[in-house]
Amino acid sequence: MAGSALRRLMAEYKQLTLNPPEGIIAGPINEENFFEWEALITGPEGTCFEGGVFPAKLIFPPDYPLSPPKMQFTCEMFHPNIYADGRVCISILHAPGDDPMGYESSAERWSPVQSVEKILLSVVSMLAEPNDESGANVDAAKMWREDRAEFNRIAERIVRKTLGIPTP
Amino acid sequence: MSTVELKTLFYESRYPSGWATVCLLLYAPIGLILVVLRTFIALQALVAAAVLPELSSVRRFVLRSMCVVLGIVVKEENVSQRNENARVIVSNHVSPCDHLAVHVLSSCVTPCTWGQPAPIFRVIGVKDFNLSQGVDAVVTKINHHLEQYSTPVLVLPEGSTTSGKTGLLKFAVWPFRIRRSVQPVLLKVWRPYVTQVAPTALVSSFWADIFWFLFSPSTVFTVRYLPVAEQEEEETDLQFSVRVQQMMADALGVVATKYTSGDKAEYEKRYILELNRPVPSYSSNSELQRMARQVRDVLPHVPYDVVVRDLSRTRSIDVTITNILEGHISFTPLPEPQHEPVHVLGTQTTDENSVSFVAPTTSTQGTSFLDTSAPSFPRSAQERMLSFNERKARLIENARQKYIEKHGLKLVGFNC
């Protein structure tokens, strides 16, 4: 099956290289290991994360696409749906039945019809519209609800950090 | 009436099971020597019979020697029921040598039921009554024969053999039109324990049956006479045949079925078809389905039949996946089971318990800045990695420039 996973990843890589969604880039960090990818995601316009380019790591299982990859931001993140260590909590990254938080609907779960591109687009949506009921980062969720200005300030700092621009 | 299944009427395999198989194997060398010796003796007897004139004494000699050669021993039971006036003998059919056994006892003739009898059969009393010309002609001819000769006629109204253990096939009606009385006879076959091979089995050929007669030290036929059956005044030929069948079945302790010899022939045909169904192709078919499932696991949008078609050519999951991914196969992708991405932001209801998102349509502003596409997908890994790193750097740089432009006055110029 590893051969199939490799072929599928290569096909997705080709697709993402030639025709990527805007502001998104993804591919293997080193082709010696095709199961470890890096992705850059641009913060969506009109949101507090606008303009930032957020790096993340994608680790694919040997039985991909039967099982979903794992995704983890490698930069500092402050977001209700992202754990402090950068792991992304989003339904498309969980197979049906695998529901660590117990609150996900099966609407958009991982299945082989999903793809890296769909995961990344989902993450872009998540950056734009956090789900503050998910408790991946309780502080961020609380702040998003109660002190949006402070949340926006922290987001701004993170955006600048990803771009290598010093915070004022 | 026909409460038993057709297939239970016959031996599916002629070979025994258990210890009898071991005995059979141990006996095999002796059996094979017997086969060779008996074949030579039988050939000589037949040549003699063909050369000598067709006299009853000659016939009796040939019949006797055939019985010796085939190891056939005939025992009579209930001889008191034998009625010389009953000119038609009706018997059940359990082996290809049934008529031989009865002929030895009563030097009768048997209408040939399988086309033109070969000369050797004519010698042992199988007579051609032109069965192919229709039953009326046969009945007339047999009546003619009965008037000419004093010997009776043996008919096997089942038309085909059974195991004789479960049921009788439906009787043909014409033998019951010849005379108003018939002499029913029950045949049983017995072979010694060392060669417990059934005298005949499903789809076995005549010569295979004869081989086992030659192989076995002896085959004992028991001929049991039943009281002569008379056709009653009101009774039709059909009713008469059914009554005799029932009578014989009861005496044998078996079921009188409605299956005909035609049904048996059909069943044998189906049986052969099933035996000859190529097993490897069957298993490779399920193998193909398993492989197709694996391909579909990886590429669920490809129609199943497209996958199977390519797999049957390539016989390899990996090659088929490559073929599909590299676009060597054209197909119409299946519709995805989920919703297409919608124009999104703000469409989510707050009561939704999941971080479930749909893809946003990216805005058209600043497209060139955020375009990360490569003009081509290089063939070598080295070039691809180089291109990937360049594009990453370009994206970050573009985003940075854009950010500085947007907030620039506040930051860069004065911070340096």
Image: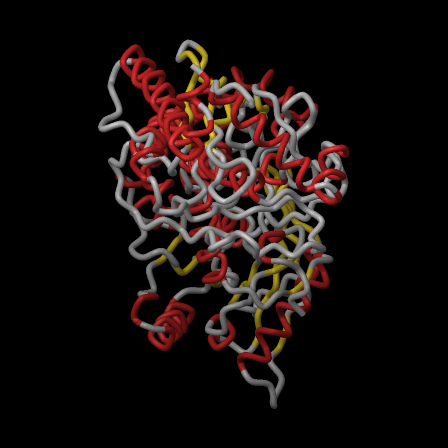
Q: Nearer the viewer, residue A69 or A52?
A: A52
Which residue is painted at 48% across and 20% down in the image?
Answer: A165
- Residue A114 rendering spot, x and y as whole percentages: 49, 40
Q: Is residue B45 left or right of residue A61?
A: left
Which residue is painted at 27% across and 13% down in the image?
Answer: B383
- Residue B226 rendering spot, x and y as whole percentages: 67, 62
Q: Nearer the viewer, residue B137 or A55?
A: A55
Q: Is residue B251 above or below residue A103?
A: below
Q: Nearer the viewer, residue B186 or B321?
A: B321
Quadrant of the drawing holding the N terminus of chain B: bottom right
- Residue B212 rendering spot, x and y as whole percentages: 50, 32
Determine the image quadrant of residue B311.
top left
Pick out the residue farthest to the front. B414
Tag count: 0
- Residue B198 rendering spot, x and y as whole percentages: 58, 38
Q: Nearer the viewer, residue B294 or A101?
A: A101
Which residue is painted at 34% across and 64% down in the image?
Answer: B129
